[in-house]
Image: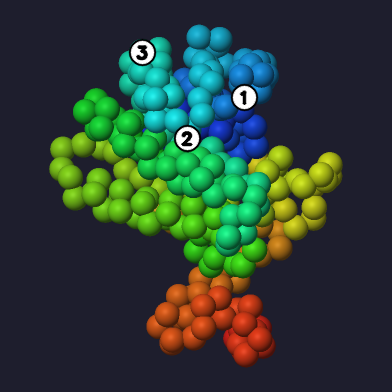
Amino acid sequence: MHAALVKGSTAVVTGGASGIGLTAARYLARAGLRVCIADCNAGRIAMARQTMIADGAAPGDVIGVPTDVADKTQLSALADQAFAAFGAVNVLMNNAGIQPGSDIFDAANNWDRILDVNMLGVIRGVQIFAPRMIASGQPGLIINTGSKQGITTPPGDPAYNISKAGVKVFTEALQHALRNSPGHQVEARLFIPGFVFTSLTAHGRTEKPAGAWTPEQTVDFLFQSVVRGDFYILCPDNEVDRATDEKRVRWAAGDIAENRPPLSRWHPDFADAFKEWLNS
């Protein structure tokens, strides 16, 4: 197990009252960590906390802090409460995210909120927590939740894609900075879920689609990958295997290297070439 994930350590999980965040919080609590759940919905926090106590967590080992990660003041207050309650933070999982949909000209006025939550919420979370985690001298792990859409950037939701592309670039830069700064035990990982059935992806469905993974499968894969030492935690699902993901990533990078039109997978002059290459 990673040194930051041992019994008695402390984890803060944003977006921790539902979906992948709640599943990760429950996983960590079952592993013996003390957990601070941060979420913008106080009612969901209360229910999540009760769920974790029902799992066997001691009431004093689980706290909830209503937090809008788009608000830097609230993120600072979250850090203050977590450190005050538990003395240290060993794991920071920046997982809060939204996907209301977007268009290139922002007719729905969603861009500011999407970027504030999905990208700046991660960046500011790290900037607020990481110096204190480093100063503690204890093992530390920062997990930032990205998306495959931030790597292959499919058309249809540009604000979400940009926010997650920003998380990828920031987390790469963060890990580079951490590994080149001696005298501490903190590192970062980029978590890239596949198709996971949560409230974010349900879109009115009540039953899990056959192609989706459950949050439990996804979180198990996450922490297995952490133990292996993976930085890019690229999750498969029941529709897309690792080999397909790798080819999609390579093709997207090839648009630049081979001077193809942007998003050539979806360009009429290149779509068939991509399909042939993918199946080769």
Kind of residue at badge 3: Ala
Looking at the rendered structure, which numbered label has been put on residue 84? 3
Determine the residue positioned at 54% across, 49% down.
111
Apparent side of residue 163 relative to residue 54 in the rendered image (left or right) = left
Asked if labels 3 and 1 touch by Cβ distance under 8 angstroms, the answer is no
Determine the residue positioned at 42% across, 54% down.
166
Q: Residues within 10 Å of mark 3 (few under 14, many from 20)?
A: few
Sequence-first tag of 1 and 2 = 1
- Residue 108, x across and y down, in percent: 64, 50
Q: Residues within 10 Å of mark 2 (few under 14, many from 20)?
A: many
Say which element carries label 1: loop
Looking at the rendered structure, which numbered label has been put on residue 20? none
Answer with the quarter of the image where residue 136 lies: top left
* Quadrant (top left/top right/bottom left/bottom right) for the C terminus: bottom right
Q: Nearer the viewer, residue 80 or 222?
A: 80
Q: Which residue is mark 2?
A: 70
11 to 261, vertically: above or below: above
Q: Return the residue found at the far top.
A: 60
Answer with the quarter of the image where residue 248 lies: bottom right
